[in-house]
Amino acid sequence: MLKDLNIGIIGIGTVGRGVVKILEENKEIICARAGVNLNIKKGVVRDLNKTRDIKIPLSTKIEDIINDDKIDIVVELIGDVQKSYEIAKKTLQNKKALVTANKAMLAYHRYELQQIANDIPIGFEASVCGGIPIIKALKDGLSANHIIALRGILNGTSNYILTQMIQNNQDFFTALNQAQNLGYAEADPTLDINGTDAGHKLLILASIAYGINAKPQDILIEGIESINADDIEFANEFGYIIKLLGIAKKQDNSVELRVHPTMIDKNKMIGKIEGVMNGISVIGDRVGETLYYGAGAGADATASAVISDLIEIARGKSSLMLGFERTPQTLLKLKPKEEIQSRYYFRLSVDDKSGVLAKIASILSENHISISTFLQKEIKHKNAAKILFSTHTTTEKCVKNALDQFKNLESILQNPYIMRIEDE
Ligand code: NAP
Ligand code: HSE
């Protein structure tokens, strides 16, 4: 007879309902793997009147779960940062194990939680890339390596939108609406679109890969909201595809962390990842490149990761939350944003008159920026033109200075737009 491990789930929305259903439908194999009966005792929601199609007792009081002595593991799936952090703290203070999918909360509070938890298990596999076991891969499978670089599509919603825009010429808002209806987007989808959600996930991965304690405001984060058909066409013309990438690179004792739309070779594995799928390439100094691919959002994929944490906790084999049992002797520093180096793509809308190109060239030259490829498109009947070009490698600082100077030019008609190009 297997012993019971009692679970309380706070938040029975997209992911919570997925957890309840999978635990019910795959009960036998899950319990065989866990060695215990994983038994959902209660769920907490805001609104008891919503139709949910599940058969567990529900309450609206979070205390009914975190203060229940018979509950061993609290699964937090509500979303809000502050509320979720309070739930996490109280859960750990009450000596219960915690499982959360809340990357926004972890992006701010993972180190405090690790400290409060000490040896109480915290599972958060579902917080990064839905169903892909990337946390376990970094924490365990790759733990012999220095991580040289990590590049990933970390947000399913934005990858879904970009795929729809590029492949089906769909407009941005129709694609976003579909992603929301499919349960991929955050309650506030701005976080998906403006790169913040991918930034939260990159910070969690960076803690495990490098031991770096950075917050969202410390790193470069840009979203997909300003990408237009010209950018897509330019990328295509030069053999690239546009993806929202989270990038981490280690050089000597510093690590750069950034999230932004990126032009990458369309034949690269990551360039071929479409729709809600996520993918990550991790390069270790000993293992070389490893690739991870799978559904990055949605009820089943995310719930699958939540349950993998429950099984690990049931087995009693959880390791320290962020994967470092002690501080490494060589501490890595976060590289300042302005020192980050890349190739860039520029999109400028300008008056179509003589001398404008010379002024642009002069600003680029003053900032030591060298053009690699160039396209000019006439904007019909407006006496205006679009100037699209890519550069050789330069720094964020030089590009920022050039952008500031472009904005002051009378002949510039709209805010210039830039995108980074990743050739490695
Ligand atoms: P969701 O569909 O909006 O569900 C949230 C659930 O939490 C709902 O059941 C809601 O109750 C409940 N809730 C919210 N605030 C509450 C409060 N103050 N007290 C009690 N219950 C509360 O969200 P979700 O998509 O399942 O996401 C849950 C978490 O997983 C978030 O942190 C999200 O970032 C993360 N996540 C989601 C995905 C995904 O694909 N959706 C993937 C990875 C991670 P009502 O139902 O009564 O409104
Ligand atoms: N909104 C997130 C995404 C959910 O689209 O990737 C998975 O973390």
Image (cartoon, rainbow, N blue to C red):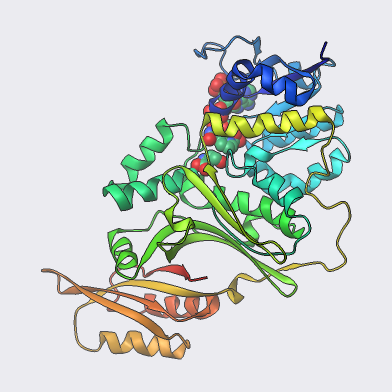
Occupied quadrant, residue 2: top right
- Residue 244 is left or right of residue 61, and the answer is left
- Residue 233 is left or right of residue 142, and the answer is left
Identify the residue shown where x is 46% and y is 61%.
268
Please state which of residues 357 and 95 is positioned toward the viewer in this rendering.
Answer: 95
Q: Where is the N terminus found, in terms of image quarters?
A: top right
- Give the x, y percent position of residue 318: 82, 38
Occupied quadrant, residue 389: bottom left
Does 280 appear above or below 294? below
- Give the x, y percent position of residue 215: 68, 55
Residue 90 visible, this orientation: no
Identify the residue shown where x is 37% and y is 37%.
177
Does 64 appear above or below 405? above
Please state which of residues 74 and 323 is positioned toward the viewer in this rendering.
Answer: 323
Please state which of residues 379 and 255 is positioned toward the viewer in this rendering.
Answer: 255
Residue 1 visible, this orientation: yes
- Split into quadrants, the picture shows ligand 1 in the one at top right
All told, the count of numbered labels is 0
- Give the x, y percent position of residue 149: 63, 64
- Residue 293 is left or right of residue 311, and the answer is left
Please state which of residues 27 and 16 is positioned toward the viewer in this rendering.
Answer: 27
- Residue 13 is left or right of residue 127, and the answer is left
Occupied quadrant, residue 331: bottom right
Does 310 appear above or below 192? above
Identify the residue shown where x is 73% and y is 75%.
252
- Give the x, y percent position of residue 280: 57, 53
